[in-house]
Every structure is written in C-alpha cells, then in structure tokens.
Image (tube, rainbow, N blue to C red):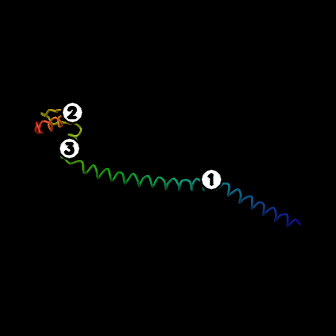
Amino acid sequence: MENIARMTLRRWLAVGALVLVALLYYRPLKAYVDARGQLGQRQAVVRRLEHEKQTLEHRLGATSSVATVAREARALGYVRPGEHLFIVKNIDAWRKRLRASLQPHGR
C-alpha cells in the first residue's frame, strides 16, 4: 500500500512539474509567436518601402537633367536672370474677340 501511495505521489509530482514547466514556457512561447507575426508584417512594410525607394530614385534620375529641371522651374513660375515675367489673364475672352474679328462682317 505504501508503495502505491509513493507511486501516486510521484505521478502527481511529475504532473505538477510538467504543469509548472508549461506555465513557465507559455509566455516566452507566446512572445516568440507574436514576434514572428510582427516580423512578417514589418518585412512586408520594408519590401514596400524598398520598392517605393527604387521608384523614387528612378524618378529622381529621370528628373535631374538640366532640361527637365528648367521645364519644372518654368512651370513653377521661375524666370532666368534678365527675363521678365508677364501674367496674361482672360485668354479665352481674347480668343473669342479674335475669332469674331476674323469672321467676315455683313454675310
């Protein structure tokens, strides 16, 4: 009988030790799994940002020519030294008057 009690006690101690080990490993394992999930998400973000960087570098290479920079500067309203900037308004009204003046009168 004493032998059976010892065996039962040993089994319960073994089960208790296994439960303790499982409880001790639960948080680190959960943290590891969560970290792997975050790593996958961050790697996807890094890949997207690398692609965006390549696209921007390609655009930068295409726009760094002197002619392109000059064209962009003109579009922004910059002028070369010695030039004068004129702002013309009501072009559509002027075109209408021009068309009306070019049409023959009296027909």
- Location of the N terminus by quadrant is bottom right
Task: In the displayed orientation, state which residue is furthest to the front.
Answer: 107
Question: Residue at point 68% right, 55% down?
Answer: 23
Separation of marks 3 and 2 at Cα, in angstroms: 24 Å
Give the amino acid at mark 2: Asn
Q: In this image, 104 relative to 77: left or right?
A: left
Pointer 2: residues within 10 angstroms few (<14), some, or many (20+)? few
The residue indicated by pointer 2 is 90
Question: Residue at point 36% right, 51% down?
Answer: 52
Residue 15 occupies quadrant? bottom right
For label 1, the SS is helix
- Above or below: residue 45 compared with residue 97: below
Question: Residue at point 58% right, 53% down?
Answer: 31
The residue indicated by pointer 1 is 27
For label 2, the SS is loop
- Above or below: residue 83 compared with residue 13: above
Mark 1 vs 2, N-terminal side: 1
The residue indicated by pointer 3 is 71
Pointer 3: residues within 10 angstroms few (<14), some, or many (20+)? few
Task: Tell us which disc is closer to us: 3 or 2.
Answer: 2
Give the amino acid at mark 1: Arg
Separation of marks 3 and 1 at Cα, in angstroms: 61 Å
Mark 3 vs 1, N-terminal side: 1
| Towards the viewer: 24 or 49 | 49
| Towards the viewer: 105 or 81 | 105
Residue 86 occupies quadrant? top left
Question: Residue at point 37% right, 54% down?
Answer: 51
